[in-house]
Structure formats: C-alpha cells, structure tokens
Image: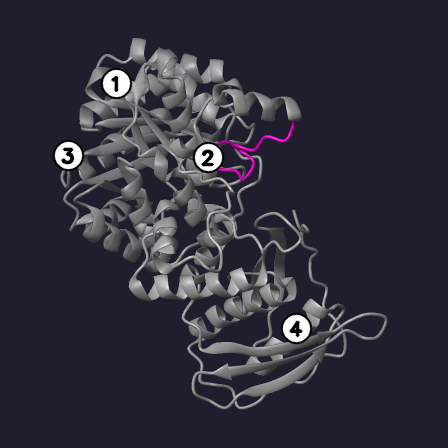
Amino acid sequence: MTGDQIVIFDTTLRDGEQSPGCSMNTKEKLEVASALVELGVDVIEAGFPIASPGDFEAVHQIAARFGDRSTICALARSLDADIARAKEALASAEKRRIHVFLATSAIHREHKLKMDKQQIIDKAVEAVANAKEFCDDIEFSPEDAARTELDFLCEVVEKTIAAGATTVNIPDTVGYATPSHYFKVIRYLKENVSNIEDAIISTHCHNDLGLAVANSLAAVEAGARQIECTINGLGERAGNAALEEVVMAIRTRADYYNVHTKIQTERLVPTSDLVSSITGMKVQRNKAIVGQNAFAHEAGIHQHGVLQERSTYEIMRPEDVGYVGQNLVLGKHSGRHAFRDRVKELGFELSDDEMQQAFDDFIALADKKKEVYDSDIRALIDSRLTDAPARWKLISFHTSAGSSVPTATVELQCEDEPVVCDAAIGDGPIDAVFWALERVMDMPAKLEEFDVRSVSQGKDALGEVRVAINVLGRKYQGKSVSTDIIEAAANAYLQALNKADAAAGRDAPTGGRDAPTGGRDAPAGEGVE
C-alpha cells in the first residue's frame, strides 16, 4: 500500500439517518453497524445519544457489540449534558470517541448562538476538556468551518487541540465550498496552526452543490487524513460524501493521491444494498461504484473494447467492489450446494433457516421465469431479510380491472386465527388491494411513496415494489418482489402494515372497517425501469 492511511469515518448511522424517511430502529442500526465493521470502517459514528432514548440505546448496544473492532463514536454538542450522555452510551466500548461540535461562522455566531468569538473559544475548550476526562480519542468540529474567517478558525483549532482534541474536523456543513476553496482552507490550517501536527485533520462535506466527494479528495491533497462519509452518500438535504466513491477514488488513483484506506472494497456493493434495503432509499441506476449501470456497457464500440481488453472502458474491476454481473448461473435444477455457494459469493451470510427460505423462494421463482439472474437472487434475499415480524399473512388475492370499477378480494390470516376475507374497490387494482388489506386489518393508512422497478431483464423479470405509509403520524416501509407486480405491491403494503401493527402492539381485530366509497390519491410510482 502507498503513502499514509486515510481514516474512514462513517456517519451513516448518525448524519445519514437524518435523511428524510431514512430513520432506522435499533435492530436495523445493529445490522448496518455489523456490515460497516466487516467493511473495515475505522470509526463508526453510531448516533447522537442525547437526541432520543432510541438513539442512546443504539449507540449503547453498538458500543457493547462492536467497540473492540472499530472505534465507536458518539456526537455531542458542547454542553455538559450532551457529553455526559455520550460517555454513558460509550461506557462499554474498548475503542471509543466523543465527537464534540460548536458552530464558529459569523452567521451562526450572530443568528443561532448569540455568542462572540471569545465565548465560542471558551465553550469549545471547556467541552473538549470535559470529554477528555472520559477517553483519549476526542474529535472537535467547528460547525460551518468552510464559512468561518480563517484567522478565527485557526485560533479555535489551535486552542481545542491544546485542550486535548486528537482529531479536528473541518465541516462544509452547508455544502458551500468548492474544491479549490476547501483545499485552501485545509492548507491554511496546516501552515498557520502551530500544533496542527498533534491532531488529524478531518473532512465532513455535504453535497448541496454536488461537490462533496471532490471537496473531500481536495482536502486529502491538502493534508487531511480522515474523511467523514456515508454509504450511498446519505445525509441531510443532498447528502454527504459517498464512502464508496471516496474509497475507490483513492484506490484507483493511488498513483496520484499516494494514500490508502483499510476498507475491504469487495464489501462495498453488499453494504450499499443493505443500507438501501433498510432505509428504503433506492440507489440511482447510474450511481458511481454501486449503481446498477456502473459496469454496464450498451454502446457497441464500448462492448467491443471491453471484450478485447476490459481496461479500455473500465478503470475498476467489478469484482473489486463486490459487484456481480447478471450472468445466468442457476436454474430450477440447481441444487442447494450450488445455491448456497452463489449466495455467499453475493455477500450474504444466512442462517440455516434463512438459507432454506431463500432456496424455497428461488425454486418457486425458477418455476415462474426462464432465466434467474444474480440480481433476482439478491432481491429475493433482501426481501426476506427486511421482513418485520408479521402477524398477518396473505393467503390469496384476486383483482379485477378494466372498463368496470376495479375491485380486489383478499384472504388474510392473523397467526392462528381463522382466515378473514374481504373486498374493496379502488381507482386501480393495486389501490383496491391496498384498501382491502386495510379493511381486514382495521388499519387506516396513508400511502406516501410507491415505487416500482425491474430487478433484472426480460419480460419475466422480477418486479420490486417499495412503499412507504403513514399510520398515526409514523412512517413505515415495505418492500417485496414478484414476477406479478400486483402481488409484489400487496406483499410490500402488507409488510408495512405489519410493522405498524407491531408498533401498536394490538390484539387481532374483531372486524373490518367500513368499505371506502372511492379510491385514494396515491402518488404515482416511478414506473418500471
């Protein structure tokens, strides 16, 4: 490996989770944390403990389970209560860090904090010293550093390093910087902070201008040695620097940057798929590194070049990021051993029960479609792994559509209760199915998102449906796949309703609600891709 190591600081579980609609429960956060550990992330920012009891519990459990393998970090404002809560959450971690922040830009000082420069310095130094009493690894962030006066930024950084900060993060909080601007900020700190060699300079770039990755790499050129990033670039507003992009840029252009990371790049695509599945945030097809089209070639001249020599049009090998192409490798006559090997190659670690369920789903799919692709297998497993504990199961459904009023009839069973049958109308067969499911479960819901895409190729391709519903002000997501898009929609909606049912902790309802007299205004999906 060449040059210095770049510390990869992943904030998917903290900043990434702040993306609208991306909140995760503790179980899901533990699953993502496990994937980040396997990926080789150096520091996992597990959450903001004082923000909520759920955030505290997630940080606490992640620290207990993974704190001996990766450094577990907790965020805190420069307040005693925040720092105390972070200390409590991280108590069981062998490798731990407290990340303290305080805004420094003129606009934040004047309009948010109502504090002058000296008050900012005093507060930051006090907070760092407080955190330092708990652990040696302390990070300080002058929030909105990219818009802070350089002389004042230098003063804050120098004083917090003197107080015990071992990492100083220079956030481009609102995505305002450009690469040359951000390079100059980092270089200025390197040249004008007397004790800068006593700490690692870190980047934290937001993507409001689409420059988060470019700015992070510019900072590395200027001397930064930690990059804060998220899987798939998740984060507030337009998101953060995408981990997979900065890591592969450093690896692919090692000749230029002369640095390296410890990331196990073959885990990038599986980790991206997991985060996408849990958060419901679909990765765009042309997304760099992990998008479905990242290694696809349609133009004839490109295809010819790749067939002759891959490097003509590919600067990375697909297998280096864990991408497995859509090659036909299995059919309905394939045995369990071949299937198990393929599942492992795709990056999944399944229990015996999960493997059996996946194999059963595979055989059922192989009976329906002629060609089974890796993406089909991945979608089947993702659909199983993201299932919530489901009291209600779909036994059967029937829909009718056309020039007459669309109708749907469904049969559901709640645990060991008798099968319940009901029907409803809607403004289309899928809408009618959704109404019927709500009627049987006595669970009124508002459909907020409905997305349909093709998982693989061909007329018999699996269709994946993702939905998000709102029940009593809380959002629940569901996802399912099937060669029948109405069946996939029904199971995705039922999965979301089951999550709402579990959250409510209800007994089985004794009867349905009144039939609707008309359809609902459901948002249109993006259509099959």
Which residue lies at the image location 36% right of the left edge and 12% below the top edge?
A: 255
Task: Give the dominant element type of the magenta stretch: helix, strand or loop.
Answer: loop
Q: Residue reaching furthest top?
A: 191
Q: CA distance from mark 3 to mark 2?
A: 27 Å
Residue 133's spot in the image, x, y percent?
Answer: 13, 39
Q: What are the residue bounds of the magenta stretch?
A: 288-299
| Label 2 SS | loop
Instruction: Tell me, yes or no, whether the highlighted magenta stretch contains residue 289.
Output: yes
Instruction: Tell me, yes or no, whether the highlighted magenta stretch contains residue 247.
Output: no
Residue identifier under label 1: 4
Q: Amino acid at mark 3?
A: Asp
Residue identifier under label 3: 136
Q: Amino acid at mark 2?
A: Asn
Please tell me which of labels 1 and 4 falls first in the chain: 1
Q: Residue reaching furthest front?
A: 333
Residue identifier under label 2: 240
Please tell me which of labels 4 and 3 falls first in the chain: 3
Residue identifier under label 4: 433
